[in-house]
Image: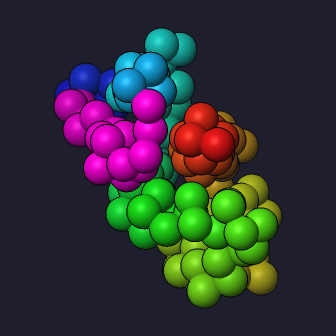
């Protein structure tokens, strides 16, 4: 089975961001892979992408609107971000993961998707 054929749960924005308007809730779910980039990932890179997405949904989305409104940064998330294993991206060694450029770009896009959701709430 190819990675793009795997079923992934849709990003439930009503749970992650309860203050979204009905129009924002209609924003398309991040479950499609139109360019089939997931097929370029190794299995461990694909699981890393899913791990980042779950972290963003469960750890970041519920608290980030409060920080956004106060113009503060949730510094307590930095160690957790580091433990995900994607920071350092394509660098090999020095405790960096040495991901492929494609895998790193996809990880960053998953990470950035949450910022879009916060912007939509503002």
Where's residue 31, x and y in %? Answer: 36, 28
Image: 78 above or below 120: below
Image position of 61 with respect to 18: above or below: below
Place of residue 82 in the rendered image (x, y in percent of width and height, measured from the top left): 61, 78
Q: How many marks?
A: 0
Q: Observer-nearest residue: 98 or 24?
A: 24
Magenta part, dominant SS = loop
Q: Residue at x 64, y 43 (%)?
A: 122
Identified at 56% across, 41% down, the residue is: 121
Judge left or right: residue 63 versus residue 58: right
Asked if the magenta segment contains residue 81, the reply would be no
Residue drawn where x is 74% and y is 56% of the image? 90
On screen, residue 60 versus residue 97, left or right, reads left
Q: Quadrant of residue 98?
A: bottom right
Q: Which quadrant of the structure image shows residue 25?
A: top left
Q: Position of residue 64 (x, y in %)?
A: 56, 63
Q: Residue at x 53, y 14 (%)?
A: 35
Horizontal side of 63 relative to 81 (left or right) equals left
Pinpoint residue 97: horizontal percent, then vertical percent.
64, 68
- Above or below 90: residue 80: below
* Magenta segment boundaries in residue numbering: 6-21
Decide which of 119, 40 is in the foreground and name it: 119
The N terminus: image quadrant: top left
16 vs 96, nearest the viewer: 16
- Along the viewing direction, whichever of 108 and 70 lies nearer the viewer: 70
**Hey, which quadrant is residue 119 in on the image?**
top right
| Color theme of the render | rainbow
Residue 9 lies in magenta, yes or no?
A: yes
- Asked if residue 17 shows in the view, the reply is yes
> In the orientation shown, which residue stands out farthest toward the top?
34
Observer able to see residue 32: no
């Amino acid at each position: 089975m190819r990675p793009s054929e795997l079923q992934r749960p849709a990003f439930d924005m009503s749970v992650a961001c309860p203050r979204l308007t009905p129009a924002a809730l209609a924003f398309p779910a991040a479950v499609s892979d139109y360019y089939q980039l997931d097929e370029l990932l190794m299995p461990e890179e694909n699981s890393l992408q899913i791990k980042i997405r779950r972290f963003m949904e469960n750890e970041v989305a519920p608290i980030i609107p409060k920080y956004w409104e106060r113009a503060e940064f949730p510094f307590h998330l930095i160690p957790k971000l580091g433990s995900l294993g994607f920071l350092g991206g394509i660098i090999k060694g020095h405790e960096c993961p040495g991901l492929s450029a494609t895998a790193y770009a996809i990880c960053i896009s998953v990470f950035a998707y949450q910022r879009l959701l916060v912007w939509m709430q503002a």
